[in-house]
Image: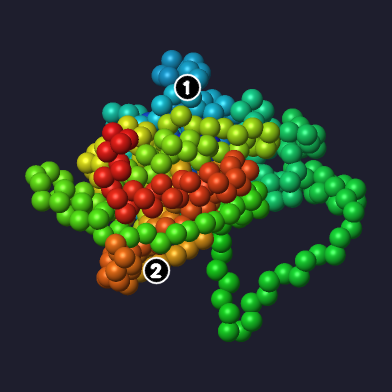
Amino acid sequence: MPVVREFTLPDLGEGLTGAEVVRWMVEVGEVIAVDQPVVEVETAKAVVEVPCPYGGVVTALFGEVGEEVPVGAPLVTVAVAAPADGTAAPAAPGGPGEPVERPLVGYGVAESRGARRARVRVGAAVPAPAPATAPVAAPAPVAVAAPAAQAAPVHASAVVPVISPLVRRMAREHGIDLALLAGSGPDGLIMRADVQRAVDTAAHAAPVQAPAPAAAASADAELIPLRGLRRTIAEKLGRSHREIPAATCWVDADATELMALRAQLNRAPGPKVSVLALLARICTAALERFPELNSSVSEDGSHIVRHRAVHLGFAAQSERGLVVPVVRDAQLLGTEKLTTELARLTESARAGSLTPAELTGGTFTLNNYGVFGVDGSTPILNHPEAAMLGVGRITPKPWVHEGELAVRQVTQLSFTFDHRVCDGGTAGGFLRFVADCVEQPGLLLRTL
């Protein structure tokens, strides 16, 4: 008799609490191998293939396409063949109700393809897994008994007796903690009626408020679901706007000498130095002088966290939307190495192959919106970072140079900062140093 194993969504990257189902890669009744990818999910800003550590017959899939699955919640259940001697199959890492702790192979990023698969409940008749050495034919159907309870842990150590993903979704939408409910089903299984009672109780206890008018689509309007990458961006920027008292200052700078330096560097052998790399090098030098801007405010707002390393994020536009890849330890890299790393991450962004680790953990962001042909911007900070430097297009403009009117290569620099971490004097000093380095790049020699 096969043994049913439950595979839960593992932690796919630092700080991630869940992922959205993009595409199911298997279906109920399909025989899968150990570490075969079973689902594509979208994390913060990457689409990741998730492999299952069990080999056998898929008995259930949990989560509709577009539905968010929390870390630790069930993804699939697999009927694993018992040994030939009839003893129970040994427990593999990540048994029922426990997150898988061993490394999974096959992680990668891919663009969404394929159509939606229907979610299927446990308890259907499914074929038994074929032996590993035998070709996969049409195996005889075996009725797989549904487990009495499936794990939907609110925390890593909490195991909640609930099978239906509809019940979990209903609880999540209404803010109901399943760990606090007593189930009325067999063996304490939490049913939909249990969640509904909790919702009704909470509604009676809460003060009655007039419901906000729902957005209605007129005949000439289209409703577009806010999901995936767009929803991630909306949530992050919305939180930044709500929590961070941001201020912006700006200055025009003559970038003629900076462009001349770039042309001089690119006449020498080696990789071509980008304008973005020169600006990144200026940022790391400026943060060395003004370290309070390489920081963030703690979750409870009681401390300023000053980071020793500069993990430099930069805004990049990809086919899937705006992403912010991160150059780790940028303060240790020279201009040439910064050019190489920025080019690598930019290409990965365009290809959609950035990993979650390459999209998280930034401490400061450089935003070159000049590539869109615009001069200025007041960007929203990349929460929880405390500062962002924006750079407009570099374009010929009239400029007073050495007391005479001349045509120079001019750019506008804008600097948005969290007013909790510093005052205007610090922010102005940072921006003025950056502008001076743009106008006189030889100043960077003092920091080498």
Amino acid tagged 2: Val
Image location of residue 309, percent across then percent down: 42, 31
Quadrant position of residue 390: bottom left
Q: Do the residues labelled 1 and 2 touch (CB within 8 Å)?
A: no
Does 238 sit above or below residue 290? Answer: below
Image location of residue 79, percent across then percent down: 48, 32
Image location of residue 153, percent across then percent down: 64, 33
Q: In this view, does 154 lie to the left or right of 208?
A: left
**Res 202 seen here:** yes
Quadrant position of residue 412: bottom left
**x 50%, y 50%: residue:** 428
Quarter occupied by the C terminus: top left
Residue at label 2?
A: 374
Q: Is residue 284 left or right of residue 430?
A: left
Count of numbered circles in the view: 2
Amino acid tagged 1: Ala
Q: Tag 1's secondary structure?
A: loop
Q: In this view, does 117 lie to the left or right of 151?
A: left
Distance between the alpha carbons at the discs numbered 1 and 2: 56 Å
Image location of residue 337, percent across then percent down: 24, 39
- How would you rate the neighbour count of disc 1 (Cα within 10 Å): few for under 14, some for 14-19, many for 20 or more? few
- How would you rate the neighbour count of disc 2 (Cα within 10 Å): few for under 14, some for 14-19, many for 20 or more? some
In front: mark 1 or mark 2?
Answer: 2
> Please, which residue is most extreme toward the front here?
403
**x 33%, y 52%: residue:** 438
Of 374 and 129, the residue lying toward us: 374
Residue at label 1?
A: 92
